[in-house]
Image (tube, grey):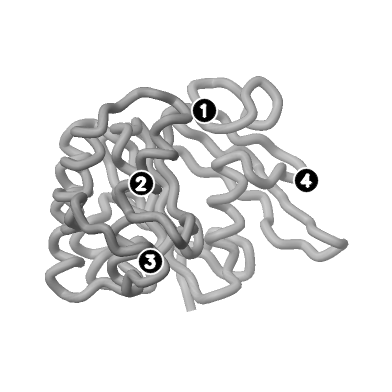
Amino acid sequence: MLEVNNVNLTIKKEPILFDISLSFSPGKIYGLVGHNGSGKTMLMKCMCGFVKPTSGVVLSDNKIVGKDIDYIKNVGIIIETPNFIPYYSGFKNLKILASIRKKISDEDIRNTMKMCGLDPKLKRHVKKYSLGMRQRLGIAQAIMEDPEVLILDEPMNGLDRDGVEEIRKILLQMKDSNKTIILASHNKEDIDVLCDEVYYMEHGRIVSNPS
């Protein structure tokens, strides 16, 4: 269970988030919808533990993120554009990331890349990847260790129609495996197809009747 309780955030005297309380359960996909600057990305950063709220708390399994634990445990994340070492292949980038926790094998990495529509044998450096390929690699990085929670900011960005369908299928499979998935998207179809519950944000607030 992931909970956001009365979270407020002010950065350099500028209020960003206002008294946000949300609860996220396993086996569901949640949508965060709002215009650029509505606060979606900053809320996700607070959830992950990358930014500490000015007041209020984020709870992961009843532990306060930023106090009891530094970050959410067992989470896969895409926030803003995924970053990789540009002069390494996609497989080598994922292998380096996987070596931190040593949870998965090379074969697990290869299988995840294939699932996301990438060839693990491709030697091309990531700097020569298209936007869509980089996004697929970012999704592979987020899901390769089979996390319990996924926090995804615009995960379909740069994907063609086939890529969008492939990633939607993966997310629905993960939902069926009882994962908690939180998704921010500007694409109404993504939200309609994927999400069980949708929260609308405007000017740092959750609103019931979006304008």
Q: Position of residue 63 (x, y in %)?
A: 58, 21
Judge depth for marks 4 and 2 and give the one in front.
2
Helix, strand or loop at mark 4: loop
Q: Position of residue 177 (x, y in %)?
A: 19, 32
Residue type at mark 1: give it.
Ser
**Which label belongs to residue 10?**
none
**Vertical placement of residue 116 versus 188, above or below:** above
**Which residue shows up at 48% across the image and 79% down it?**
211
**Is 115 situated left or right of 62 in this image?**
left
Residue type at mark 3: give it.
Ser
Judge depth for marks 1 and 2 and give the one in front.
2
**Vertical placement of residue 197 versus 201, above or below:** above
Measure the C-alpha gap from mark 1 to mark 2. 31 Å
Measure the C-alpha gap from mark 4 to mark 2. 38 Å
**Which residue shows up at 32% across the image and 74% down it?**
130
**Which label belongs to residue 54?**
4
**Is 18 situated left or right of 88 in this image?**
right
Measure the C-alpha gap from mark 3 to mark 1. 23 Å
Disc 4 + disc 1, Cβ < 8 Å: no
| Residue on which the image places disc 1 | 60
Q: Residues within 10 Å of mark 2 (few under 14, many from 20)?
A: some
Most distant residue in the right direction: 13
| Residue on which the image places disc 3 | 185
Helix, strand or loop at mark 1: strand
**Which residue shows up at 26% across the image and 71% down it?**
159
**Which label belongs to residue 92?**
2
Q: Earlier in the sequence, mark 1 or mark 2?
A: 1
Q: Earlier in the sequence, mark 4 or mark 1?
A: 4
